[in-house]
Amino acid sequence: MKKTKLAMAVSAALSIAAGQAGAQQASDDEIEEVVVQGIRGSLTQALDLKRETSGIMDAISAEDIGKFPDTNLAESLQRITGVSVNRVEGEGSEVTIRGFGGAFNLVTLNGRQMPAADNAVNFFGINANQAGGNSRSFDFSNIASEGVSGLQVYKSGRASAPSGGIGGTINVQTIRPLDAGNQFSFGVKAVDDAGGDSVTPELSGLGSWTNDTGNFGVTAFASYQERDYSNRTALGGGFFVWQTPFNPNTPAFANATIINQPGPDTLAGFIPNASMTFTEGERERTNVSITAQFAPSDRSTFTVDVLYARNDQNQQSVGDLPFFVRQFDFAAFDGNPVFSVPTLLGEPLVAGAGSDFTQAGKELPFRNSLFYIRDELTSFGANWDYKINDSWTINVDAYTAEATAGGNGPGGSISDAISIG
């Protein structure tokens, strides 16, 4: 059969169309590749800890901690439900669990109870040692968040943990070399605080090594942080009750013009003094931790760990502390029918002027003080864990820990450059 030119042209056109359809179908069959990165391992680890714990517990891992720019453990702990932090100079310090302050919570390091030291240094009624713990409250600003592998918050009691945490128990888990394997990391941060004088550095480094058989390893961590700060405060000296009922004929108000005078059934309060201070200073935090592990068998593991944390705080504070002599020529109360307080008080410029007052003039102390404070925490522990079978485990642990807080300057904790009044 002989094909004409028309038939050949039609055949060629059909072939081209078929080829284009085939190419289009092949293009439609291609699957677009989508890569999703998540933290499934971190979430799984936290859920496993909750399942294995008989009480109420929340946990976060090192991966969760690393997602946020936390400068210390207190700021990492606030990611957990029911945990809030108290900030000092913008940085997390003490932890509150379910409304209970730091003095009611227990802190453990690798399951071991950590001590806390308090070196309160008062400056016009304000604790100048804001980097130190308060009573038995642990100060988490001393510990860098990069040096831990996880945090567990137990909101119910456990037989395996020391007692004493009414609000809860916080366990800080340091990095273990047999779990971390071979790795090295180094971090550099810079902080530009509006209350500071300059940009301050934060440096951290972590190194972990294990042998080829994976039964022996060593982990070392170190960090260094500087922080500049300043603050301005204006505080009242607290409210005190004058008398009940309010008596306008006392020496304090005998010659005073009183607005909204409290009634006979109203408590009248006053503020005896006020303080106005300005503070600027710097803090230096140093952390060093070393952990060694040896596992002679799958059932036995020996662990030795050392932690050292130091926080140096140097600051200068200046302030005025005026006392009210309580010989007023003018007083305006807020008019509250239950507890009324003055919103405006006027005093004679000169004691005794226009009155029978005989008390001396106003007391106006001024103070310029230097503070040098050092907080240190040292912990050394050794642990042997032996798994007899799936139901029985022997765990032997021994440790010693010490916390100190004291002066680090030529005059101890505080030196008065100027004190008047």
Image (tube, rainbow, N blue to C red):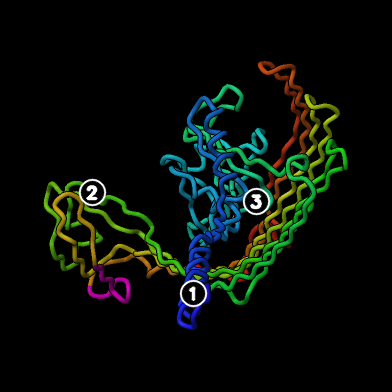
N-term-proximal mark, 2 vs 3 = 3
Question: Which type of secondary structure does the marked residue at label 1 adopt?
Answer: helix
Q: Amino acid at mark 1?
A: Ser
In the image, what residue occupies the spot 67% across and 61% down? 372
Give the Cα distance between marks 3 and 1. 81 Å
Q: Amino acid at mark 2?
A: Gln
Q: Residue 104, how many percent across, how many down?
A: 49, 37
Q: Which residues are magenta?
A: 344-354
N-term-proximal mark, 1 vs 2 = 1
In the image, what residue occupies the spot 69% across and 16% down? 392
Q: Nearer the viewer, residue 163 or 178?
A: 178
In the image, what residue occupies the spot 62% across and 48% down? 62
Q: Is residue 341 magenta?
A: no
In the image, what residue occupies the spot 43% across and 42% down? 82
Q: Residue 21, how many percent across, how many down?
A: 47, 68
Q: Nearer the viewer, residue 211 or 267?
A: 211
Residue identified by numbered label 3: 143
Give the Cα distance between marks 2 and 3. 49 Å
Q: Is residue 350 magenta?
A: yes
Q: Amino acid at mark 3?
A: Ile
Q: Nearer the viewer, mark 1 or mark 2?
A: 1
Residue identified by numbered label 2: 243
Single out the residue that lies furthest toward the right: 212
Left or right? Give the position of 97 relative to 199. left
Please say whether residue 231 is visible from this viewpoint. no
Q: Residue 328, how many percent across, how many down?
A: 25, 67
